[in-house]
Amino acid sequence: MAGIIGYGAYIPRSRIRVEEIAKIWGADAPSYKRGLGLEEKSVPGPDQDTITMSVEAARKAVKRAGIDAREIGAVYVGSESHPYAVKPSGTILAEAIGATPEVHSASFEFACKAGSEAMFVCLCQVESGRIKYGLAVGADTSQGAPGDALEYSASAGAAAFLFGREDVAAEVVETYSYTTDTPDFWRREYQHYPRHAGRFTGEPAYFKHVLGAANGIMAKAGMKAGDFTYAVFHQPNGKFPLNAGRRLGFTREQIEVGRLVPKLGNTYSGSSPLGLTAILDVARAGDRILMVSYGSGAGSDGFIFNVTGRIDEIRERAATTRQMLDTNRVYLDYGTYVKYRGKIRRAE
Amino acid sequence: MRDVAVLGVGINKKWGELWEMSLRDVFVEAALAAIDDAGADHIDSMYVGCMSGGLFAGQEHLGCLMADYLGVKPIPATRIESACASGSAAFRQGFIEVASGMSDFVLVGGVEKMTDVSGDEATYALSSASDMEYEAYHGITFPGLYALMARDHMQRFGTTREQLAHVAVKNHRHGAMNPVAQFPSVISVKDVVESVMVADPLRILDCSPITDGAAAAVLCPLETARKLSRKPVVKVLGSAQASGAIALHSRQDLSRLDSTEKAAEKAYRMAGKSPADLHVVEVHDCFTIAEIMVIEALGLVERGKGGQAAESGMTSLGGRIPVNTSGGLKSKGHPGGATGVAQVVEITRQLRGESGDRQVKGASTGLTQNMGGTGGSSVVHIFGVV
């Protein structure tokens, strides 16, 4: 059965606290922290972007899988912050890990679910036998306009997964997608920051699709919440994934391991994929995992994984997600943050 | 003038963020419920109360739109606008039309679809009920205006921060028994006084929410209602409307609602009733301070004593005069133009004895008070079971 043979995460060192952002905008930090369930978020360095973070995560995935990168038949990068409007991210990534030239490459975009789309297509390619290995990455240096609620959550990170049919560490038991045209969040060409429809992004957007996909995949697989060791949902803030989990019948314990958002922020295309890497870091043989992404616009992809004994052999080969999240942090002031994010620019 | 009865009332199944419904769907659901409740086989004329279909939904010409989608063309249908008093102003037009003998069955509805725009756009749309040139364009919004009124009331009468909170606490306790309520949650004084500051002294839990919703009623001559209705017949005993200064700076007294006092005086006289005769009252608590000022203007308490009413339990269910048994604007929700008609729905059901857990036992006389802006328009109706 096809599945994940290697995985890797990357979270930049820089962080900014909710208080630091709230101070600038005269906002009430405690109410933001309580309302959004956020404490701080990761910030990409001035020399980092979606591609550099994808390379970091992909190298860990290749290292864990222990394969020859030249055998990777597909390199897909899902992001809404591809550094180039025209020029693929995947080609740079494929060169950096040594997968070129016999490789198919594509960039995916679907707001926050571009990463799970890349995973889905990679899996299909591998299952069909057309390629031996496929690499899927979800990565973002997400944008939040100054002073907007998104500025407290929009963060940076990447998660990479290698799919194959042998030495599988997490078998894909089932997949399911739930998609409608629901414009809750968008960014048009030439616009620097996305726009969103406020509270409309909640019930009719996030919850409708996340719950729709979760219920759909569990019905398809004949499973219920109690059949899973872990569940990870797209995490735009601290509250939404907990609320979704509760409504689906999951316990806080099932959700907590993959819920990185209070300290990480919303890594958009990397959000639920990064949560999955944190779960794989601690999962044991026989554990079952539900993952449901969400992308505005809108849709959710669901995956059910069965963890195998192989996980114990590959886990230690690279740094864990929690290690990157909880150690080696550098806290930025707002001025440095806006410089790093290109919100202010040096005079020419 | 003919005597007029409320033959039927209707409201949406639920108020709140009705994402799956458009402006017309929201209205039609409530209107059909009212027609069903009335058991009427036709209506002759209709009025639609709506504060700002234009700014909230980009839609004007609501009389025609709603008559069309309700399936009642070619009857005359007109939209009535009087800011947040639009619903009760529409109801009053329906009353006048039946009383005059011009029509027998008149549908009055109120509707607002407020959540299709962002919070900033909603704030702007609501501001248009204030004096735009002299208030809004200088930067003040409704929470700020009511905060000024609250400050004045607190300084002059010693009304406390906690007394304001008791209004919200009481209305949420009532709203928790109303299946339609947008926020049927029970809250504490501590929750209110620690909630996010909006405009000092008003915090978020002092403010009514942004709501999608509609309500409707069918009016007919009293004699017809006696023949048709199998339910207790609710008569419109008094109907009055008054205008005051639109802007706060034009008023002699910031903590006095002249227009409500005037409308109440006329309605009491027309009904032959006094405040002591009332058993249940629905008032316009768009902010906690508003309920305090309104119950003073209605003569339910002495001037300056409004703050103590909710605190002492006098205006709670079981108290001397229950106010806002529906949950009020605070807990049930405040879809601008629908609010005034929804108050009529609540009082009609109370007088018929249909209010379940929140029924005021033996209620036979009730009052509704609905206002626009900071009280520039006020409409008061008094109802009785006959």
Image: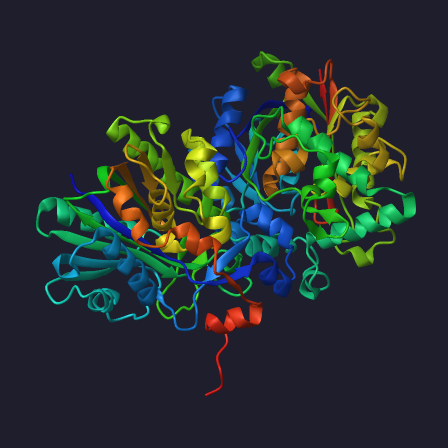
Picture quadrant where residue B123 is located: bottom right
Q: Is B57 drawn above or below residue B49 in the view shown?
A: below
From the viewer's side, name the closer residue of A222 and B188.
A222
* Spot occupied by residue B369 in the image (x, y as percentages of width and height): 73, 35
Q: Relative to residue A197, is residue A241 depicted above or below?
A: above
User: Where residue A214 appears, x then y in whole percent?
Assistant: 34, 35
Residue furthest toward the bottom?
A348
Examine the image and state in which quarter residue B320 appears: top right
Position of the C terminus of chain B, as image quadrant, is top right
Residue at figure coordinates x 70%, y 50% from the top left? B197
B162 up-or-down from B8: above or below? below
| Residue A39 left/right relative to A111 | right
Identify the residue at image location x=10%, y=63%. A102
The image shows a total of numbered marks equal to 0
| Closer to us: A284 or B174 | A284
In this orientation, which residue lies closer to the viewer: B284 or A177? A177
Query: Where residue A287 appears, x then y in whole percent?
Result: 31, 33
Q: Is residue B370 visible?
A: no
Residue B209 in percent (x, y) is at 61, 42
